[in-house]
Amino acid sequence: MDLIDRYLNAVAAQLPQDERADIIAELRDLILSRFEAKEEELGRALTEDEQEAILREIGHPLVVAARYRKGPDSLVGPALFPYWLFGVKAGLLVLGAVYAITLFIRLIGGADDAGQAIGNAFHGFFSSGLTLIGVATVAAAVFEHQGIRPAWMTNWRVKDLGAFGLADPAAWGASMTGTETARATWMPKPRARAWPGGEYLFSFLAVGMFVLWWVGVLHFPGLVSLELRGEDAVVSGAPIWSILFGPILLYAFAQMAIDLASLFRPYAVRARAAAQIVVAGAGLWLTWAIFEAGHWFTLTRGEETARIAGDWTMLDFDTLRNLGDGARDLVGIASTLSVVLVWALAISALSLAFKILANLGRLARG
């Protein structure tokens, strides 16, 4: 096989099957004409090195094949890159919050080696972050190559852009300290509608991360074990999680569907409000079912076990004020986590109730 055939075979392997023969014939004619012109100039046949030089001038087979390829030449083109970057930053913020909570749980468990716990948290964050970036890149590539452009990319208004500051950690920190200038830079005005892109994209990514964890694709090691006085305690779920596995997964998928629909139809206010009321009602029922179960997790260390469980009696401010004052043994840590979970479920229920009321208002006003 001569150089031309080797070169053309390499190009042909990158081309669509139905167009390959015509393109290769065209390239062969181009190469042969270049060879003949050079031979006439030199008055002799070309050496193999001279043929190589001409083929290099024509271009690498991958580059030449790309000239004939239809569609975009990049995974994430310049038009989609800013949206990809925002999604990645928002997702990494969610991941950072998850691992910060994980690290907090390990540290209150009295881990002897706090440095190792922090190192594990960073390792998990970077590992999951790479997965997030990969998923975001695949999604953006589908948008790029299929020519998909949601309405929120083209039908936007300047006064609705404030929520994009949510992807700026500096703005988060400044807003938490109450800096008025920073808050005015990115927080929506009191009566301005929040931009229906940033909020729902952030929610879609956050719930998507939860779904991946819930079905076992993502793993957060700090959530399934605690280090207590140098010994690992295993965290196992109570039966309620197996019972509600399907309903919780359906609830998460429903929320993701609403967020995705909101990205494509950002101003369908009443339809979104009606859907949010139904989903929030389902979330309220799930929260009640979880709370009523009374037993959520079990800590096991050797032969010793302790339940993470609670009831209404823990919804007391005195109990909350004394949080963390208990012993650092297995039972003490389980007691502390029980109080945390009781209050987290109560706050979740209140949040869902307010969400229902807010969406009833949107449904009425449009």
Image (cartoon, rainbow, N blue to C red):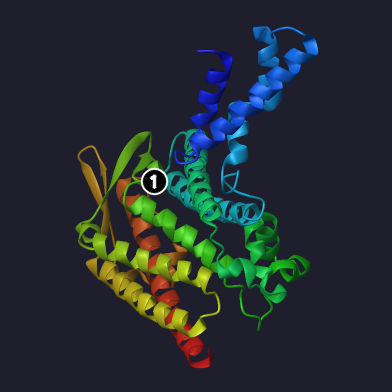
Q: Is residue 363 above or below residue 299?
A: below
Residue 312 seen in the current view: no
Residue 282: horizontal and vertical position, in percent? Answer: 32, 75
Quarter residue 345 falls in: bottom left
Q: x and y percent of residue 216 in the render?
A: 32, 47
Q: Which amino acid is tagged 1?
A: Leu
User: How many marks are shown on the rendered structure?
Assistant: 1
What residue appears at the point 31 percent right and 51 percent down from the top-left corner? Answer: 215
Q: Which residue is identified by label 1?
A: 218
**Image coordinates for residue 183, horizontal then vertical, percent:** 72, 68
Q: In this rendering, is residue 213 above or below 179?
A: above
Residue 158 point in image, percent of width and height: 72, 73
Classify mark 1: helix, strand or loop. Answer: loop
Foreground pick, 290 / 355: 355
Give the residue drawn at x 34%, y 75%. Answer: 284
Q: Nearer the viewer, residue 41 or 231?
A: 41
Q: Write the residue at 60% across / 30% down.
A: 27
Q: Residue at x 75, y 16 (%)?
A: 38
- Is 302 on the left-hand or right-hand side of 197? left
| Above or below: residue 326 compared with residue 27 | below
